[in-house]
Image (cartoon, rainbow, N blue to C red):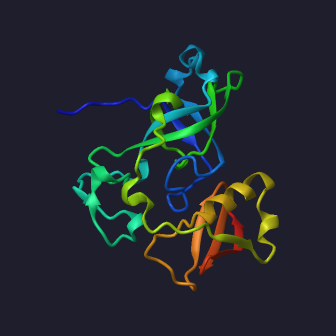
Amino acid sequence: MTYSMKVIAHVVSPFRSKFGIPRQSGLSELPAKIVFEPEYRVPEAVRGLESFSHIWVLWGFSGTVREDWSPTVRPPKLGGNKRMGVFATRSPFRPNPIGLSSVKLEKIDLECCEAPTLYISGADIMDGTPVFDIKPYLAYTDSHGDASSGFALQEAIGPLKVEFSNGTAEKIPDGLRCGLSEVLSQDPRPAYQNSAERIYIMDIADLEVKFRVNGDVLTVFEVNKL
Protein backbone atom coordinates (compact mmCIF):
# COMPACT_ATOMS: atom_id res chain seq x y z
CA MET A 1 0.00 0.00 0.00
CA THR A 2 1.28 3.46 -0.85
CA TYR A 3 0.21 6.97 0.06
CA SER A 4 1.06 10.26 -1.56
CA MET A 5 1.88 13.51 0.21
CA LYS A 6 1.75 17.05 -1.08
CA VAL A 7 4.72 19.39 -0.83
CA ILE A 8 3.28 22.40 0.99
CA ALA A 9 6.46 24.48 1.23
CA HIS A 10 10.23 24.45 0.88
CA VAL A 11 13.06 25.53 3.16
CA VAL A 12 15.38 28.43 2.38
CA SER A 13 18.53 27.65 4.35
CA PRO A 14 22.22 28.65 4.37
CA PHE A 15 23.17 24.97 4.06
CA ARG A 16 23.85 24.50 0.36
CA SER A 17 24.98 20.87 0.59
CA LYS A 18 24.63 17.96 3.02
CA PHE A 19 28.15 18.25 4.44
CA GLY A 20 28.25 20.51 7.50
CA ILE A 21 24.55 20.41 8.35
CA PRO A 22 24.11 19.91 12.12
CA ARG A 23 23.28 16.29 12.88
CA GLN A 24 20.21 17.29 14.88
CA SER A 25 17.89 20.27 14.98
CA GLY A 26 18.31 22.93 17.65
CA LEU A 27 22.12 22.77 17.62
CA SER A 28 22.60 26.02 15.69
CA GLU A 29 21.06 29.47 15.75
CA LEU A 30 21.53 30.02 12.03
CA PRO A 31 18.39 31.52 10.49
CA ALA A 32 16.28 29.90 7.79
CA LYS A 33 12.75 30.32 6.50
CA ILE A 34 9.86 28.24 5.26
CA VAL A 35 8.24 29.48 2.05
CA PHE A 36 4.86 28.01 1.20
CA GLU A 37 3.94 26.81 -2.27
CA PRO A 38 1.43 29.17 -3.96
CA GLU A 39 -1.54 26.88 -3.22
CA TYR A 40 -0.83 27.09 0.51
CA ARG A 41 -0.05 30.80 0.83
CA VAL A 42 -3.15 31.37 2.89
CA PRO A 43 -2.79 33.52 6.04
CA GLU A 44 -5.67 31.69 7.71
CA ALA A 45 -3.64 28.45 7.58
CA VAL A 46 -1.15 29.83 10.15
CA ARG A 47 -3.66 31.69 12.31
CA GLY A 48 -2.70 31.12 15.95
CA LEU A 49 0.75 29.74 15.14
CA GLU A 50 2.35 33.02 16.28
CA SER A 51 1.58 32.09 19.90
CA PHE A 52 3.96 29.12 19.77
CA SER A 53 7.72 29.49 20.28
CA HIS A 54 8.70 26.28 18.46
CA ILE A 55 7.31 24.11 15.67
CA TRP A 56 7.77 20.64 14.26
CA VAL A 57 8.70 20.49 10.57
CA LEU A 58 8.08 17.29 8.62
CA TRP A 59 10.25 17.26 5.52
CA GLY A 60 11.80 15.05 2.85
CA PHE A 61 15.44 13.96 2.45
CA SER A 62 15.52 15.25 -1.11
CA GLY A 63 19.31 14.87 -1.35
CA THR A 64 19.32 11.17 -0.48
CA VAL A 65 16.44 9.66 -2.46
CA ARG A 66 17.02 5.96 -3.16
CA GLU A 67 14.94 3.20 -4.70
CA ASP A 68 15.99 0.57 -2.17
CA TRP A 69 16.51 0.48 1.59
CA SER A 70 18.49 -1.53 4.13
CA PRO A 71 17.26 -2.78 7.51
CA THR A 72 20.58 -1.70 9.05
CA VAL A 73 22.72 1.42 8.64
CA ARG A 74 26.07 2.69 9.91
CA PRO A 75 25.44 5.68 12.24
CA PRO A 76 28.17 8.37 12.03
CA LYS A 77 27.96 8.63 15.83
CA LEU A 78 29.50 5.16 16.03
CA GLY A 79 32.25 5.95 13.55
CA GLY A 80 30.54 4.22 10.65
CA ASN A 81 31.95 0.91 11.88
CA LYS A 82 28.89 -0.60 13.54
CA ARG A 83 25.48 -1.38 12.12
CA MET A 84 22.24 -0.51 13.86
CA GLY A 85 18.64 -1.03 12.87
CA VAL A 86 17.43 1.77 10.61
CA PHE A 87 14.49 2.44 12.95
CA ALA A 88 16.93 2.92 15.85
CA THR A 89 18.62 5.78 13.98
CA ARG A 90 17.82 9.05 12.25
CA SER A 91 19.61 8.01 9.08
CA PRO A 92 18.20 9.50 5.85
CA PHE A 93 18.39 6.06 4.19
CA ARG A 94 14.93 4.80 5.18
CA PRO A 95 11.96 3.14 3.51
CA ASN A 96 10.37 6.59 3.47
CA PRO A 97 13.04 9.35 3.44
CA ILE A 98 11.24 11.62 5.91
CA GLY A 99 12.91 14.00 8.37
CA LEU A 100 11.47 15.57 11.51
CA SER A 101 12.92 18.73 13.07
CA SER A 102 12.01 20.83 16.08
CA VAL A 103 12.90 24.45 15.33
CA LYS A 104 12.36 27.85 16.90
CA LEU A 105 9.73 30.02 15.26
CA GLU A 106 11.23 33.50 15.17
CA LYS A 107 8.41 35.31 13.38
CA ILE A 108 5.69 35.04 10.77
CA ASP A 109 5.77 37.54 7.92
CA LEU A 110 2.25 38.27 6.67
CA GLU A 111 3.21 41.20 4.44
CA CYS A 112 5.88 39.91 2.03
CA CYS A 113 5.11 38.80 -1.53
CA GLU A 114 5.33 35.13 -0.49
CA ALA A 115 3.30 35.56 2.69
CA PRO A 116 2.83 33.89 4.98
CA THR A 117 6.53 33.10 5.41
CA LEU A 118 7.86 31.45 8.57
CA TYR A 119 11.25 32.59 9.87
CA ILE A 120 12.94 29.91 11.94
CA SER A 121 16.25 29.07 13.60
CA GLY A 122 17.89 25.83 14.67
CA ALA A 123 17.09 24.00 11.44
CA ASP A 124 19.16 21.01 10.34
CA ILE A 125 17.71 21.17 6.84
CA MET A 126 19.35 21.71 3.45
CA ASP A 127 18.36 24.59 1.20
CA GLY A 128 15.47 23.73 -1.12
CA THR A 129 14.18 20.83 0.99
CA PRO A 130 10.48 20.05 0.50
CA VAL A 131 8.19 20.41 3.51
CA PHE A 132 5.20 18.09 4.00
CA ASP A 133 3.70 19.44 7.21
CA ILE A 134 4.10 21.89 10.10
CA LYS A 135 2.78 21.36 13.61
CA PRO A 136 3.16 23.35 16.86
CA TYR A 137 5.64 22.05 19.43
CA LEU A 138 3.98 21.39 22.80
CA ALA A 139 6.50 21.42 25.64
CA TYR A 140 4.21 19.73 28.14
CA THR A 141 3.92 16.60 26.03
CA ASP A 142 6.75 16.72 23.46
CA SER A 143 9.56 17.13 26.01
CA HIS A 144 10.54 14.14 28.16
CA GLY A 145 13.17 15.02 30.75
CA ASP A 146 13.71 11.41 31.79
CA ALA A 147 14.15 10.05 28.26
CA SER A 148 17.25 7.94 27.49
CA SER A 149 19.28 8.57 24.34
CA GLY A 150 20.75 5.12 23.76
CA PHE A 151 23.94 4.88 21.74
CA ALA A 152 23.50 8.49 20.53
CA LEU A 153 25.38 9.70 23.62
CA GLN A 154 28.20 7.19 23.36
CA GLU A 155 31.73 8.38 22.60
CA ALA A 156 30.69 11.98 23.15
CA ILE A 157 33.50 14.50 22.75
CA GLY A 158 33.73 18.13 23.66
CA PRO A 159 33.28 20.91 21.12
CA LEU A 160 36.15 21.83 18.86
CA LYS A 161 37.90 25.15 19.22
CA VAL A 162 37.34 27.11 15.99
CA GLU A 163 40.05 29.44 14.73
CA PHE A 164 40.15 31.65 11.63
CA SER A 165 43.50 32.21 9.92
CA ASN A 166 44.70 34.26 6.94
CA GLY A 167 42.08 36.96 7.50
CA THR A 168 39.23 34.56 6.76
CA ALA A 169 37.05 35.90 9.59
CA GLU A 170 36.75 39.25 7.81
CA LYS A 171 35.39 37.51 4.69
CA ILE A 172 32.40 36.12 6.60
CA PRO A 173 29.46 38.48 7.27
CA ASP A 174 28.88 39.26 10.94
CA GLY A 175 25.43 37.70 10.86
CA LEU A 176 26.86 34.41 9.62
CA ARG A 177 30.17 34.15 11.47
CA CYS A 178 28.80 33.21 14.88
CA GLY A 179 26.43 30.59 13.48
CA LEU A 180 29.15 29.11 11.27
CA SER A 181 31.51 28.86 14.26
CA GLU A 182 28.77 27.13 16.20
CA VAL A 183 28.25 24.55 13.44
CA LEU A 184 31.97 23.93 12.94
CA SER A 185 32.57 23.49 16.67
CA GLN A 186 30.27 20.45 16.56
CA ASP A 187 32.75 18.74 14.20
CA PRO A 188 30.97 18.13 10.86
CA ARG A 189 33.50 15.47 9.81
CA PRO A 190 32.53 11.81 9.53
CA ALA A 191 33.60 10.14 12.79
CA TYR A 192 36.05 7.85 10.96
CA GLN A 193 38.04 10.72 9.40
CA ASN A 194 40.67 12.28 11.67
CA SER A 195 43.66 13.12 9.48
CA ALA A 196 45.19 16.47 10.43
CA GLU A 197 46.23 17.03 6.80
CA ARG A 198 42.85 16.41 5.21
CA ILE A 199 41.10 19.47 3.76
CA TYR A 200 37.35 19.77 4.24
CA ILE A 201 35.11 22.03 2.20
CA MET A 202 31.74 23.30 3.39
CA ASP A 203 29.33 25.41 1.33
CA ILE A 204 27.24 27.76 3.44
CA ALA A 205 25.15 30.66 2.18
CA ASP A 206 27.22 32.05 -0.72
CA LEU A 207 30.58 31.01 0.72
CA GLU A 208 32.96 28.09 0.26
CA VAL A 209 34.73 27.44 3.57
CA LYS A 210 37.90 25.32 3.72
CA PHE A 211 39.22 23.97 7.02
CA ARG A 212 41.44 21.40 8.70
CA VAL A 213 41.16 19.75 12.12
CA ASN A 214 44.16 18.96 14.31
CA GLY A 215 43.27 17.44 17.66
CA ASP A 216 40.54 19.59 19.18
CA VAL A 217 41.28 22.66 17.03
CA LEU A 218 39.48 23.37 13.77
CA THR A 219 41.17 25.99 11.60
CA VAL A 220 39.43 27.82 8.78
CA PHE A 221 42.20 28.79 6.36
CA GLU A 222 40.36 29.84 3.21
CA VAL A 223 36.98 31.42 2.39
CA ASN A 224 35.78 32.03 -1.16
CA LYS A 225 32.65 33.42 -2.73
CA LEU A 226 30.62 30.84 -4.62
**Residue nearer the viewer, 209 or 77:** 77
Residue drawn at (37%, 60%) of the image: 151
Residue 147 position in % (x across, y down) = 42, 45
Q: Is residue 200 visible?
A: yes
**Residue nearer the viewer, 111 or 141:** 141
Q: Is residue 66 visible?
A: no
Residue drawn at (58%, 52%) of the image: 27
Relative to residue 65, is residue 143 drawn left or right?
right
Residue 78 position in % (x across, y down) = 38, 68
**Residue nearer the viewer, 139 or 178:** 139
**Circle count:** 0
Name the image quarter holding residue 208: bottom right
Residue drawn at (63%, 65%) of the image: 185
Vertical side of 52 occupied by 178: above or below: below
Q: Quadrant of the C terminus?
A: bottom right
Residue 109 position in % (x across, y down) = 69, 26
Q: Quadrant of the N terminus?
A: top left
Vertical side of 42 occupied by 77: above or below: below
Q: Residue furthest toward the bottom?
A: 197
Vertical side of 69 occupied by 141: above or below: above
Residue 222 position in % (x across, y down) = 70, 74
Relative to residue 19, is residue 87 drawn left or right?
left
Q: Residue furthest toward the left?
A: 1
Name the image quarter holding residue 82: bottom left
Q: Residue furthest toward the top?
A: 44
